Amino acid sequence: MGKTNGFLEYDREEGRVRREEERISDFREFHESLELSDQQRQASRCMDCGIPFCQAGLMIAGMMSGCPLHNLVPEINDLVYRGRMEEAYRRLAMTHSFPEFTSRVCPALCEAACTCGLHDAPVTTKENEKAVIEYAYANGLVKEEIPQVRTGKKVAVIGSGPSGLAAAQLLNQRGHLVTVYERRDRPGGLLRYGIPNMKLDKSLIDRRIRLMEEAGVTFICNTDVGRDLPAAKLREEYDSIILACGASAPRDIPAPGREAEGIRFAVDYLSEVTKRLLDSDFDDVPYDLVQDKDVIVIGGGDTGNDCVGTSIRLGAKSILQLEMMPEPAPERLDSNPWPEWPRVLKVDYGQEEARWRFGEDPRIYQTTVKEFVKDGEGRLKEVVLVSLKPVRDEKTGRINMVPEEGSEKTYPAQLVLIAAGFLGSESYVTDDFEVETDARTNVKTKEGEYEIIEFCKANPHFYGNSALLVMMYTGMRVGELPSLKVEGDFITCVSLKTRKGYKEIVRTIPISPMMQKVLPLIDFDKARDASQFTSRDALKRIFKDRHIHEFRYTFITRAKECGCNPEAVMIWVGHEFDKDVVTSRVDRGYTTYSKEYFKSEINKIDYELGQKC
């Protein structure tokens, strides 16, 4: 993959970042792109590493390693290096619904797991992805698929964040009539109001939403399902409902004085700033929220960093950012080996801007709030902070951060932004839909999976890091569900894969006597997403308790080349071959077979299955 010695010949080079003094005066994106020729050179650094951890998407030591979407990273990098950008886009689109979003805001787990990064700087996979998708948009390659056949089934998606959008996109491709409900005034959810415009320009969301609407997806905004629209009414109107509401219940800081005016949840603050900017076409910059105030941000994650960057742009007098945990090491420790996610000290754009604006890093580690102090009119004026120290719990062995007596300090503050994470789903939604929640108030599903009860639930809450990627992945998997089912004396199969490319095909195949024997062997829950796999892997997933060599794999390969539906590889009888196969690869080379030969092969399969059934 890439140039054989590219990682030895070229150093890592990233796109230009606008200087702090320039970018803090506006809310425009500040990461610029390399020229395409330079990006190709960066893609050439992708080495033939043998085991590409970059695309693994595995949980290692409780942290995600590699891309949760399983993007085919080495193949995409190789195509970028060779200048085959259209093919690179097609390859990227196989696993990814919205590269234009992740190439800007994802934490680049692929790069953290890059083999080249073990002893050198990793490949610029994130920027390569951005180059691919922007090339595709510029050249008219990005089109949402408009299904040729509609199933007549109606699906409601509750929430228009990354998970909801991904589910809606794929369900629409399957031919279902999809309606997305959003409680805010514009679709996008987390993408729209949880991420500042300088990280993700909102015109990019509008660009994708327009394509989805043209393909048949309906968006209904300003409708809060569970309050404005009850679940019972949705159940009457729709065949399936997907809850993709996100983890929108914020974690609070219940310290004395919490009721003081001037204490806000971070996402509420970021949402108000973005809404005022969008409503005024960026003319109404909400300086009144922050200007000349001492700001304290509670939380050291991405949202806390966004609060720092936003507050600097709105004229904060001073900023402190509190982090409960100890300061990470500048480099990997022996206890945190590659390819684990690196637990090292990072300086994000907000901290860079604070260093430039105030002369020092805004973060204070091992610190939390002991008390919020109000003035005589109930407004916040000061915050009492206390240092924390790690103490091991003798019973559980866990390390807890506990207050250190005598370490209290008082700081002026007129605005506190709580970015301490989220607890899970909001109760009014889960109560209205009568779904079970776990101890952390997340919708209860098997870890890493969706679940079908009366409706589908896209559950993005089981990962802390890379939340955007995981939400998109779960939404995509939900979108693959309704693709194969038995209806009376027929089996209906829906496939997006064909011999000549991606196009939806709906086949209705009569159930023959042989198929009646085959049906008990089929695991339909696994068959529904078999189109994402090779024929061999599909067989393994579809047939329960059967070894792969019990069936003629070579025939399946030839049948697939002939145009068989890869989701329905178990249904050989009853399929009509309307043309000869030009070439088929077998163990002895390339040979031409006729449709008569395939019919004879079907008879053999009939006999073998008849013996085993």
Image: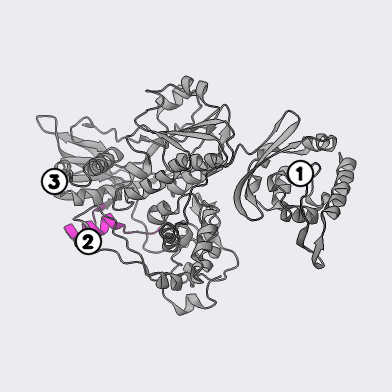
The residue singled out by tag 2 in the image is: 20
Q: Position of residue 76 (x, y in %)?
A: 52, 63
Q: Nearer the viewer, mark 1 or mark 2?
A: 1
Q: CA distance from mark 2 to mark 3?
A: 18 Å
Question: What secondary structure is marked by label 1?
Answer: loop
Picture quadrant where residue 454 is located: top right
The residue singled out by tag 1 in the image is: 570
Q: Position of residue 528 (x, y in %)?
A: 65, 40
The residue nearer to you, when weighing 43 against 408, is 43
Question: What secondary structure is marked by label 3?
Answer: loop
Residue located at (84% from left, 48% from top):
602
Residue located at (61% from left, 36% from top):
482
The residue singled out by tag 3 in the image is: 291
Residue located at (53% from left, 58% from top):
90
On the picture, is 268 further left or further right than 165?
left
How many badges with numbers are in the image? 3
Q: Position of residue 356 (x, y in %)?
A: 20, 61
Q: CA distance from mark 3 to mark 1?
A: 66 Å
The three-letter code of the residue at mark 1 reads Met
Q: How is the image coloured?
A: one colour
Picture quadrant where residue 23 is located: bottom left
Q: Residues within 10 Å of mark 1 (few under 14, many from 20)?
A: many
Quarter of the image with the N terminus in it: bottom right
Q: Residues within 10 Å of mark 2 (few under 14, many from 20)?
A: some
The residue nearer to you, when weighing 426 against 64, is 426
The residue nearer to you, when weighing 237 against 587, is 237
Quarter of the image with the C terminus in it: top right
Q: CA distance from mark 1 to mark 2?
A: 60 Å
On the picture, is 190 further left or further right than 261?
right
The three-letter code of the residue at mark 3 reads Gln
Q: Which residues are magenta?
A: 344-363
The residue nearer to you, when weighing 352 against 256, is 352
